[in-house]
Each structure stands twice: as structure tokens, then as C-alpha cells.
Image: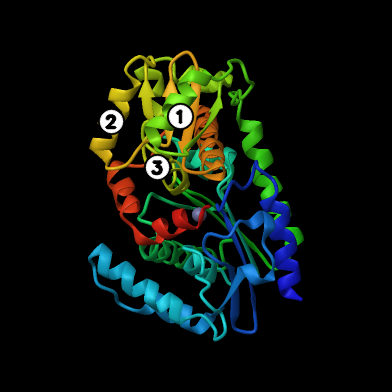
């Protein structure tokens, strides 16, 4: 029964591109000592009961109380092994979401975690924390932290402090450069909370993204780009007004040079390639490949817009969705003090983190 409710609201929110893109976001429900949480790499839009992993809540709580090595690699490896061990028998090869420990921290029955561009306009903005305190005084704000075990640990500290101060549990939590968690005992309350957050943010935004198509793709350049990427590669393109705006110069590109959230790293690779013109594209492409060890997946071109290139249609499509998502975030962020992307050290951690590599691999 609880899985029916969970599946219903998961697919409903998962089918709304304003709320969920690709494999982003996750949901969970709790019943009789078990947490049912989305499996990593599964898309919410088409999730079925099989897409959830059943976890032992007592074992999840024990993970939060355990002491792990302080070095990133050994700590995350040990925590991941314990997380896999906290699955109930019969879960096959399913791997619980990266954010399972966060879901288990909330005592409420249902948890909804999303990365909407509108919300991330605030969480990826210079004055995001101050705006959050002003607009959502009951919410908890979590500053930038390494994802995985350390993020769960930071959230536990802040949620425990909230409980001690107010004598009740926080049910709304914003994560800097990441997204938002809602928790409630029934799906209607969850929905009311979501609508309240979206409406409040919308009211605050005088500056809105403009994704109106204005320019058509340069087909010769698309073909050349696909060839540079590799055999059978495919390109996608958007010549929307805001893609043109950000591609206008190196300066206007500044907000998009670093990724905003882990999703952008997973689906677009950490950094876009910027071309002031397409004349020297081959050289610039080769330089990028040498510097990063892989080819760019997102290419901004002055006067044209944004191209994505990948080894399959679905990867090129997803990269374009996420590139447009970063454009939307950059625009929304202008209402909250201006864009503030992830710090390079954190990007580096995520690029080398096995858990996100797994999520990227799951994306066909
Ligand atoms: Zn997330």
C-alpha cells in the first residue's frame, strides 16, 4: 500500500520537467522499520515499485553513529559498503540512492527530494542563505558540503540542533548548490509544501529565463563537432535567447564556467567549452581534451547558442536539458544576489567520486 502511494507521487513529480530532469531527484517512504528509497540511476518519471530499494532503518541509523576514516576515499568506500549492507534481503543488484542517509534522517513517513531550477536559483546564488532565512523562516539551510556521507552527517547535526531549539522536527531543508528536501506524513502535505515553496520563489523573481528559440543550428558545425567527439556521436542544439546571451562573451559566460550542482557534472561533465567563433573549433576541442582527459559535452558558441555532443541520442538530449537547466539557474539566481557556482575543490571531489560515476554510467 505505502509503495503504491510512493510510486504515484514519484511518477507525478518525476514527469514534470520543471521539477525533475533525467535521473535527478529521489523519493522515499517509511513503514514498520523499513525505508523504501529510489534506486540510484532510476528516473522518477517511469519508476515502478521495483525501482525502490528496501532498507533496514536500524542499520541506517547505526551508519550515522559510526566513526569512519577521515580521508575521502576510504570513508566513502566504507560508508557505501555499510549502505549496501543495510538493504533488506532480496534486493538483487539494486543500489540505494546516493542520498538515502538523508531520507532516513527525517522521522516523517514521506520524503521528496528535488533539484528544480527555480529552487536552485536561490540555492546557487550569492545571497541564497539570507533569502532562504527571509522567505522560509521554518526551513533549514545546509551550506556547501561534500555529497555522500559528509552531507548526511552535516544535515544530522543541523536537524538535531533544530529539534533541540524548537522542540519539533524540521520538514523543509535547502541544500546549497544542490536542491530541496520536503518531508511529511501524508502526500497532500508534501504537495502543499512544494507548492508554497514554488509560489514564494516565483513571486520573488522579477528576472525570468528566456528559452525562446531565436537561432537555428549551424548544421555544418554540428557535423564537425560530432566528428571531433568520436564515431557515431550525435549533436543537439539550442539557440534560445538566454543561450545567446550567456555565449555573448567570456565575461557573460562567467556564471556558467563552473557547474552549479552535481547533476550538471554527471550529465554535462564539469565544464563547458566556449568558442568565440567556430574557426578554431578543432584546436580548442583538442586543448580541452588534453586539459581534462575527456571531450567536452557542452559547447557554447558566440552568436549561436549551445550545442551538446555525446555518444548516444539520449545522452546528448539529457546534456542539453541540463545545459538549459544551468542557464535557467543562472537567470533565477540574478534575483538572489547573482549566480554562485560550486567551488572547484568540491567539483573535483565529485568528478572523482565513484558514486556519481555510477550514476553517470546508469544514464544510457
Ligand atoms: Zn540530490
How far apart marks 3 and 2 lie (CA) works out to 16 Å
How far apart marks 1 and 3 lie (CA) works out to 26 Å
Is 30 displayed left or right of 308 in the figure? right
| Mark in the foreground, 3 or 2 | 2
Residue at the front extreme? 231
How far apart marks 2 and 1 lie (CA) works out to 36 Å
> Where in the figure is residue 201, as x and y percent of width and height?
62, 37
User: SS class of the residue under badge 2?
Assistant: helix
> Where in the figure is residue 188, as x and y percent of width and height?
76, 59
Is 13 displayed left or right of 42 in the figure? right
- Contact flag, marks 3 and 2 (Cβ < 8 Å): no
> Where in the figure is residue 173, as x and y percent of width and height?
53, 55
The answer to whether any part of residue 315 appears in the image is yes
**Within-10-Å neighbours for mark 3: few <14, some 14–19, many 20+:** many
User: SS class of the residue under badge 1?
Assistant: loop
Residue at the bottom extreme? 89
Earlier residue among tags 1 and 3: 3
State the residue in front, 262 or 89.
Answer: 89
Number of the label disc, if any, that sits on residue 269:
3
Residue occupying the point 26% across, 70% down: 74
Residue occupying the point 54% across, 86% down: 89
Residue occupying the point 47% across, 78% down: 60
User: SS class of the residue under badge 3?
Assistant: loop
Which residue is the site of mark 1?
337
Which residue is the site of mark 2?
286
The answer to whether any part of residue 61 appears in the image is no
Q: Quadrant of residue 118?
A: top right
Amino acid at each position: 500500500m505505502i509503495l503504491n502511494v510512493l510510486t504515484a507521487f514519484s511518477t507525478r513529480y518525476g514527469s514534470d520537467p520543471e521539477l525533475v530532469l533525467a535521473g535527478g531527484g529521489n523519493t522515499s517512504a517509511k513503514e514498520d522499520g523499513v525505508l523504501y528509497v529510489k534506486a540510484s540511476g532510476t528516473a522518477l518519471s517511469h519508476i515502478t515499485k521495483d525501482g525502490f530499494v528496501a532498507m533496514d532503518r536500524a542499520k541506517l541509523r547505526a551508519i550515522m553513529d559510526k566513526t569512519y576514516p577521515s580521508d575521502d576515499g576510504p570513508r566513502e568506500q566504507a560508508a557505501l559498503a555499510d549502505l549496501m549492507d543495510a538493504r533488506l534481503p532480496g534486493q538483487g543488484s539494486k543500489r540505494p540512492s546516493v542520498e538515502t542517509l538523508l531520507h532516513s534522517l527525517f522521522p516523517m513517513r514521506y520524503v521528496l527530494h528535488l533539484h528544480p531550477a527555480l529552487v536552485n536559483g536561490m540555492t546557487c546564488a550569492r545571497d541564497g542563505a539570507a533569502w532562504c532565512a527571509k522567505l522560509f523562516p521554518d526551513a533549514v539551510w545546509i551550506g556547501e558540503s561534500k555529497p555522500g556521507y559528509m552531507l548526511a552527517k552535516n544535515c544530522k547535526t543541523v536537524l538535531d540542533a533544530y529539534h533541540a531549539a524548537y522542540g519539533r522536527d524540521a520538514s523543509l531543508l535547502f541544500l546549497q548548490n544542490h536542491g530541496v528536501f520536503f518531508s511529511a506524513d501524508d502526500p497532500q502535505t508534501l504537495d502543499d509544501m512544494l507548492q508554497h515553496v514554488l509560489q514564494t520563489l516565483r513571486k520573488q523573481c522579477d528576472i525570468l529565463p528566456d528559452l525562446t528559440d531565436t537561432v537555428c543550428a549551424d548544421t555544418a558545425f554540428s557535423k564537425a563537432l560530432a566528428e571531433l567527439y568520436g564515431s557515431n556521436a550525435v549533436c543537439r542544439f539550442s539557440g534560445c535567447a538566454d543561450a545567446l546571451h550567456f555565449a555573448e562573451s567570456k565575461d557573460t559566460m562567467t556564471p556558467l564556467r563552473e557547474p552549479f550542482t552535481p547533476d550538471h557534472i554527471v550529465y554535462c561533465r564539469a565544464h563547458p567549452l566556449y568558442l568565440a567563433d567556430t574557426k578554431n573549433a578543432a584546436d580548442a576541442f583538442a586543448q580541452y581534451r588534453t586539459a581534462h582527459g575527456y571531450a567536452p559535452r557542452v559547447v557554447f558558441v558566440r552568436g549561436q547558442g549551445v550545442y551538446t555532443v555525446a555518444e548516444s541520442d539520449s545522452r546528448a538530449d539529457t546534456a542539453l536539458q541540463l545545459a538549459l537547466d544551468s542557464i535557467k539557474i543562472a537567470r533565477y539566481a540574478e534575483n538572489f544576489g547573482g549566480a554562485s557556482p560550486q567551488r572547484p575543490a568540491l567539483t573535483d571531489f565529485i568528478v572523482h567520486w565513484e558514486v556519481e560515476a555510477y550514476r553517470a554510467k546508469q544514464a544510457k
